[in-house]
Image (cartoon, rainbow, N blue to C red):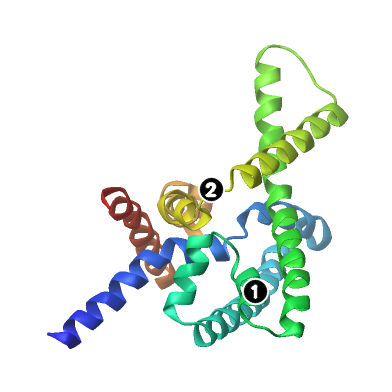
């Protein structure tokens, strides 16, 4: 029946788009630096202060992103969105080329540069910390030491070369997110913390919340999307 078919299509689309949404709203790389900074600033009140700051940040992020998403969906046809995906360009680039409007043509690159810079810096901070830790662990396992300056220089060069290589290869970023990035992030950010809450004694105080069920459910649904992508 058409109604059932339509609802099935909507549910299927929501299911497959969840990994992309998880990836889009992910800001975990900068959380550790944020937590350390606020711990030094607020001391024992850091958890309460961080919760309030994150609540405001999450509301602003969701409202801004969803406003942008709905604006794009309402201004472009499904064929236009499919074409943008096929071209493997950002929606801002497509909008600038699609509409013969000088304001969009000039504003879109500026907004894109700001968004890319912000995203890169946010992920770079966390990724560089993780890479530094891996390098230090590998070096110290061999009984050696490495200076902080050398370590930071290596990390910077590695990140630069990696980002340059990915930009040159220009893979289909949406396919990467749907099939790999989103599900892995869902596993790390949704499932593992919920598992830790039940297994780590220091985190038992966070158990029993209804939000834990929601987080676990969304994490499992996001992870299952990878299996559908693999069999397609």
Q: Residues at badges 1 and 2 in contact (C-beta under 8 Å)? A: no
Image side of residue 175 versus residue 42, left or right:
left
Q: Quadrant of residue 51?
A: bottom right
Q: Which quarter of the rendered picture does the N terminus lie within?
A: bottom left
**Residue 21 drawn at (x, y percent):** 49, 66
The answer to whether any part of residue 55 appears in the image is: no
Residue at the spot 76% in from the left edge and 77% down from the top edge? 107
Q: Secondary structure at mark 1?
A: helix
Kindly give the residue lying farthest to the right in the view shown: 149
Q: Rounded to the nearest whole Å, what is the CA distance between mark 1 and mark 2?
A: 21 Å
The answer to whether any part of residue 199 appears in the image is: yes
Residue to which mark 2 is pinned: 171
**Residue 30 drawn at (x, y percent):** 69, 55
Q: Secondary structure at mark 2?
A: loop
**Residue 124 drawn at (x, y percent):** 72, 48
Pointer 1 local density, CA inside 10 Å: few below 14, some 14–19, many at least 20:
few
Of marks 1 and 2, the one in the foreground: 1
**Towards the viewer: 135 or 213:** 135
Q: Earlier in the sequence, mark 1 or mark 2?
A: 1
Kindly give the residue lying farthest to the top in the view shown: 143
Kindly give the residue lying farthest to the left in the view shown: 1
**Towards the viewer: 38 or 173:** 173
Residue to which mark 1 is pinned: 97
**Residue 94 drawn at (x, y percent):** 60, 71
Q: Is residue 158 above or below residue 29?
A: above
Image side of residue 20 versus residue 114, left or right:
left
Residue at the spot 30% in from the left edge and 51% down from the top edge? 227
Q: Quadrant of residue 122?
A: bottom right
Residue at the spot 44% in from the left edge and 48% down from the top edge? 180
**Towards the viewer: 170 or 147:** 170
């Amino acid at each position: 029946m058409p109604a059932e078919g339509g609802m099935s299509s909507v549910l299927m689309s929501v299911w497959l788009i969840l990994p992309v949404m998880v990836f889009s709203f992910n800001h975990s790389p900068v959380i550790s630096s944020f937590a350390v900074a606020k711990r030094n600033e607020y001391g024992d009140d850091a958890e309460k202060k961080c919760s309030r700051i994150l609540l405001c940040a999450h509301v602003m992020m969701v409202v801004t992103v969803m406003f942008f998403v709905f604006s794009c969906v309402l201004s472009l046809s499904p064929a236009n969105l499919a074409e943008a995906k096929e071209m493997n360009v950002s929606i801002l680039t497509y909008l600038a080329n699609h509409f013969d409007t000088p304001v969009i043509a000039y504003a879109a690159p500026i907004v894109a540069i700001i968004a890319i810079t912000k995203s890169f810096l946010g992920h770079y901070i966390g990724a560089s910390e993780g890479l530094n830790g891996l390098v230090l662990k590998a070096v110290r396992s061999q009984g050696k030491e490495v200076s902080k300056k050398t370590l930071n220089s290596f990390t910077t060069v590695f990140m630069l070369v990696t980002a340059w290589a990915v930009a040159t290869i220009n893979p289909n970023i949406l396919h990467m997110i749907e099939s790999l990035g989103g599900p892995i992030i869902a596993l790390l950010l949704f499932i593992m913390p919920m598992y830790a809450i039940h297994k780590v004694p220091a985190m038992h105080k966070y158990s029993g919340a209804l939000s834990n069920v929601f987080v676990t459910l969304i994490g499992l649904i996001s992870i299952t999307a990878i299996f559908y992508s693999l069999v397609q």
